[in-house]
Image (tube, rainbow, N blue to C red):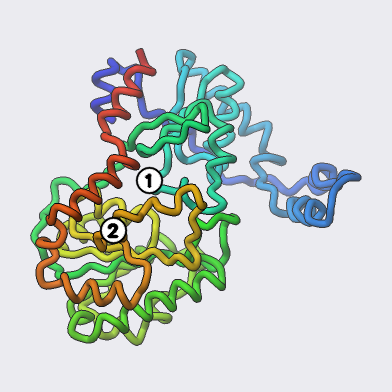
């Protein structure tokens, strides 16, 4: 960010949103009842959703709306020259969404920088809903000509931990996903969440860990989501579901704050879900194997082959027993496997197709500020 501020001569800045005090208003039930009245053409599901909004609609949109709208609107009077805003924390975050709506009224355009994982190939991907709602949607590096406001860009996310010791302290790091109790949306990207998917996720992991054998398990450093980060989330208990195997591993860690640092301190990284972690490890050029659960992480027919080259070279595994066998074959010298011509070729091709150079994003933003 400091480079962008310097090279743009201050035209690019980090603008924090104003802090809002906790709400002290009481619910205005008569107002809420008018808002959730069913229309004549509503079906049963429509009626259910609107009935839930009686209690579920945040106060920021009802009782506190006028006060907060006025406060945020007044705040942006300090930024009269603002023309573009880059914001990723959007649909799922109330205040940024309200701020972006107010800025749109002022003629400010919204650039959405894609979250740090690839979702375009999943069945039910929400991109078809998100992309039309923004002025420009900048991807991590992939492209789709069918979306006119899609920009093939890059990310300024810190994929690699910098300025830290990278001595290889662990033979194998196993990075776990986060199975949430309820699926946040109907989207195959949430392949570990919900009852059926969580059962499939744990079955995959139990079969994988069983296949490793006790000797390999003793070298396994298992990294779960930090407990402090998810203490208020409703999730399945992985330490319970995988207890029979976790008691045999080198360590089970749900406290460490930096999974990226652990990756760089490991000779081999194994990831069991398709979000940010496998990209971090591959981009950092660390020997990486990730497991794709094809029973729950469903891909559209158009993108079914997105991992084909990675599967051929062993980076992507689709069967837990075969994944365990593969790990046991390469664990003594994962570097030899990783730096082979075929593996590096498939890695480079995947990154070239999906992950752009950060310099692309920097020059794109500088051009917007000129």
Residue 255 visible in the snapshot: no
Q: How many marks?
A: 2
Picture residue at 71% right of the left edge, 41% below the top? 63
Give the position of the C terminus as an image quadrant.
top left
Picture residue at 35% right of the left edge, 22% below the top? 12
Q: Pointer 2: residues within 10 angstroms few (<14), some, or many (20+)? A: some
Disc 2, SS: loop
Residue 7 falls in which quadrant of the image?
A: top left
Residue 290 falls in which quadrant of the image?
A: bottom left
Disc 1, SS: loop
Residue 168 visible in the snapshot: yes
Q: Is residue 265 left or right of residue 222?
A: left
Picture residue at 33% right of the left edge, 37% below the top? 155
Q: Which tag, 1 or 2, sits closer to the chain's start? A: 1
In the picture of the structure, the residue carrying the numbered disc 1 is 116
Q: Position of residue 64 (x, y in %)?
A: 67, 39
Q: Position of residue 32 (x, y in %)?
A: 79, 46
136 is higher (above) or lower (below) than 232: above
130 is higher (above) or lower (below) than 304: above
Q: Is residue 340 left or right of residue 209?
A: left
Disc ID at residue 257: 2
């Amino acid at each position: 960010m400091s480079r962008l501020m310097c090279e743009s001569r201050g035209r690019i800045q980090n603008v924090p949103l104003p802090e809002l005090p906790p709400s002290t208003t009481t619910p205005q039930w008569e107002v809420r009842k008018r808002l959730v009245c069913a229309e004549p053409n509503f079906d049963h599901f429509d009626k259910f959703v609107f009935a839930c909004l009686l209690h579920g609609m945040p106060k920021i949109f009802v009782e506190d709306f006028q006060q907060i709208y006025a406060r945020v609107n007044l705040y942006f009077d300090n930024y009269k020259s603002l023309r573009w805003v880059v914001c990723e924390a959007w649909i799922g975050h109330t205040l940024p969404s309200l701020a972006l709506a107010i800025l749109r009224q002022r003629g400010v355009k919204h650039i959405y920088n894609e979250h740090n994982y690839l979702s375009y190939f999943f069945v039910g991907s929400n991109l078809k809903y998100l992309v039309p709602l923004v002025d420009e949607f900048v991807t991590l590096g992939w492209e789709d000509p069918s979306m006119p406001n899609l920009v093939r860009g890059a990310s300024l996310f810190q994929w690699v931990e910098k300025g830290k010791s990278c001595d290889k302290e662990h033979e194998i790091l196993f990075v776990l996903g986060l199975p949430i109790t309820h699926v946040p949306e109907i989207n195959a990207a949430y392949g570990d969440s919900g009852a059926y998917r969580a059962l499939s996720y744990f079955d995959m992991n139990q079969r994988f860990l069983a296949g490793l054998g006790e000797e390999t398990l003793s070298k396994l450093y298992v990294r779960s989501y930090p407990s402090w980060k998810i203490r208020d989330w409703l999730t399945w208990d992985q330490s319970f579901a995988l207890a029979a195997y976790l008691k045999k591993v080198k360590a089970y860690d749900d406290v460490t704050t930096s999974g990226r640092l652990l990756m760089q301190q490991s000779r081999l990284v194994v990831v069991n879900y398709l979000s940010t972690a496998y990209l971090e490890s591959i981009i950092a050029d660390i020997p990486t194997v990730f497991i794709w659960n094809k029973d729950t992480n469903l891909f559209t027919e158009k993108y079914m082959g997105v991992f084909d080259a990675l599967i051929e070279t062993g980076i992507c595994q689709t069967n837990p027993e075969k994944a365990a066998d593969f790990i046991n074959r390469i664990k003594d010298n994962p570097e030899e496997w990783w730096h082979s011509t075929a593996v590096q070729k498939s890695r480079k091709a995947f990154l070239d197709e999906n992950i752009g150079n950060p310099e692309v994003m920097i020059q794109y933003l500088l051009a917007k500020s000129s």
